């Protein structure tokens, strides 16, 4: 019989995703066949499964922690914000339309719960343990009647719930007491314990607060998890970009902070290099002094291209490109580098035609069809900053609307100091990433580095480190009792 454990939070960004990943690794190490699950994700970070289905990136990281391939059943409902309180709705990995928040919550969310139930039943038939992540807070009374990700899931499974609070923000005690107070009695009964996350300082000084919480709520505090620096695990949403820390390094990489930025995890492997300071530029002045500029993926390429023009980013990028500062485009950013963008059916915006940045001789036409697939590039061979780049068997995935002309079968299109690609995850390929960075080093008259990191191995080490810290700071015996 499948056992369940669910993490819900007092708010968003309290650490539910990370704790779910930690428990997946802990249970995997205990010999359990474990899978992660989140009924509904709202995020612009997504991934494509082996069968070409789109799902949230957080559940991919959790599946990696569980040492299993990601499956769309782990995240059956994905909402990708498109702006103006609307989102593209993706059910079981396929888009079903764009809906306003009101349309979705009032007319569709409870229908989507059918997909949630089906996914849970499939996972339960394959795995003996499922670790479930909620979203936001279960105490959002205005959303409660249409909720399909928090207490509705817990009730459907009769799953024990652990309530997580982020003490680093302040107000953790009040948020815990308040959340429990706002739950219905049967919902409160499902909450079996409390976890305090991101704690800094001397735990002994916090023990009176633990005693207060347990007396006030009649729920055990199952653990106090310390604040963990440099986790090395993919973040779920762009809120975490504000937590990124700059460092002194020889290569400065500026990623343009687009309004509809998506899949920023594409650049985590670059940021982890010892010779790289990668940062997100919120205004054009931040691009000054950068050794390379990256235009990232976008959920709405047309609107973000207009954003670049209206906020003088486009002018600054062209000026710097003229001075031989390299520019790299990924997915939507790649489309922006072309000559023109056509949208005859107005699938992205009210513009049927837009001029691109004209840094690459390409034209893109948007269509309603969405291309989602994993790919392996047998070979790339091109020049970048006067350096020959050659690599084989590059792995990645594509998620985009639009067909780009003059691209042919090229997966990377280059022109001197500019190149672009539709391939997400291209920089996770170790040899390719180091070649690109060494080309930039040569341009700066710096000697190339020969050591190559193994990003996949580092991720596994990160899951091990995380699970060790969490295991040491949780009452695992009591959690086992709660689950049984």
Image (tube, rainbow, N blue to C red):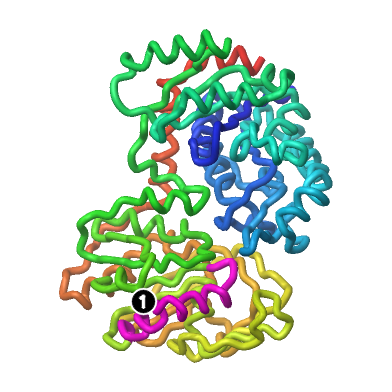
Percent position of residue 444, x then y: 19, 75
Which region shows up in magenta? Answer: 298-321
Quadrant (top left/top right/bottom left/bottom right) for the N terminus: top right
User: 352 left or right of 237?
Assistant: right
Q: Going 42% across and 22% down the picture, which residue do you hit?
A: 224
Percent position of residue 189, x then y: 69, 17
Does residue 302 belong to the magenta stretch? Answer: yes
Q: Considering the whole magenta stretch, tell me its main secondary structure.
A: helix
Percent position of residue 323, x then y: 27, 86
Q: Is residue 382 visible?
A: no
Label 1 packing within 10 angstroms: few (<14), some (14-19), many (20+): some
Q: In which quarter of the image is residue 2?
A: top right
Percent position of residue 426, x then y: 46, 65
Q: How many marks?
A: 1
Does residue 413 belong to the magenta stretch? Answer: no
Quadrant (top left/top right/bottom left/bottom right) for the C terminus: top right
Q: Going 39% across and 45% down the picture, which residue do you hit?
A: 232
140 up-or-down from 291: above or below: above
Element type where label 1 sits in the image: strand
Q: Going 65% across and 40% down the picture, which residue do you hit?
A: 38
Q: Quadrant of residue 468?
A: top left
Q: In which quarter of the image is residue 96?
A: bottom right
Q: Check disc 1 and report the residue beneath it.
A: 389
């Amino acid at each position: 019989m499948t056992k369940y454990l669910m993490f819900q939070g007092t708010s968003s960004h309290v650490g539910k995703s990370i704790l779910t990943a930690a428990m997946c690794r802990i249970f995997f190490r205990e010999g359990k066949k474990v899978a992660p699950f989140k009924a509904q994700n709202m995020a612009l970070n997504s991934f494509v499964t082996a069968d070409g289905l789109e799902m949230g990136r957080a559940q991919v990281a959790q599946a990696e922690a569980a040492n299993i391939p990601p499956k769309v059943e782990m995240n059956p409902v994905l909402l990708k914000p498109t702006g103006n309180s609307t989102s593209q709705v993706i059910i079981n990995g396929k888009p079903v339309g764009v809906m306003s928040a009101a349309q979705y919550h009032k007319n569709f969310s409870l229908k989507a719960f059918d997909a949630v139930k089906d996914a849970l039943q499939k996972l339960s038939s394959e795995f003996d343990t499922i670790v479930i992540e909620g979203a936001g807070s279960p105490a959002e009374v205005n959303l409660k009647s249409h909720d399909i990700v928090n207490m509705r899931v817990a009730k459907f499974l009769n799953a024990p719930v652990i309530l997580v609070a982020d003490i680093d923000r302040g107000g953790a005690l009040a948020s815990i007491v308040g959340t429990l107070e706002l739950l219905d009695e049967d919902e409160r009964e499902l909450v079996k314990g409390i976890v305090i996350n991101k704690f800094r300082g001397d735990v002994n000084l916090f023990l009176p607060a633990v005693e207060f919480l347990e007396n006030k709520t009649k729920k055990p505090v199952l653990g106090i998890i310390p604040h963990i620096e440099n986790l090395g695990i993919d973040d779920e949403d762009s809120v975490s970009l504000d937590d990124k820390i700059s460092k002194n390094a020889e290569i400065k990489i500026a990623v343009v902070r687009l309004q509809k930025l998506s899949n920023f995890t594409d650049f985590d492997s670059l940021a982890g290099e010892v010779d790289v300071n990668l940062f997100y530029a919120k205004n054009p002045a931040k691009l000054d002094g950068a050794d390379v500029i990256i235009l990232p993926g976008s959920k709405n390429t047309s609107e973000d291209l207009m954003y670049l023009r209206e906020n003088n980013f486009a002018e600054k990028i062209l000026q710097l490109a003229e001075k031989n500062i390299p520019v790299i485009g990924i997915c939507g950013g790649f489309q922006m580098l072309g000559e023109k963008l056509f949208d005859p059916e107005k699938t992205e915006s009210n513009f049927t035609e837009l001029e691109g940045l004209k840094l690459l001789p390409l034209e893109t036409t948007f269509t309603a069809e969405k291309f989602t697939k994993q790919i392996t590039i047998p070979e790339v061979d091109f020049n970048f900053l006067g350096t020959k780049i050659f690599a084989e068997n590059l792995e990645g995935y594509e998620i985009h609307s639009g067909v780009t002309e003059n691209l042919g079968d090229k997966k990377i299109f280059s022109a001197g100091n500019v190149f672009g690609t539709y391939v997400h995850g291209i920089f996770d390929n170790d040899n390719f990433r180091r070649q690109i960075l060494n080309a930039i080093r040569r341009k700066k008259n710096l000697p190339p580095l020969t050591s190559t990191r193994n990003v996949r191995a580092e991720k596994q080490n990160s899951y091990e480190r995380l699970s060790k810290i969490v295991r040491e700071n949780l009452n695992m015996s009591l959690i086992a009792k709660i689950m049984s």
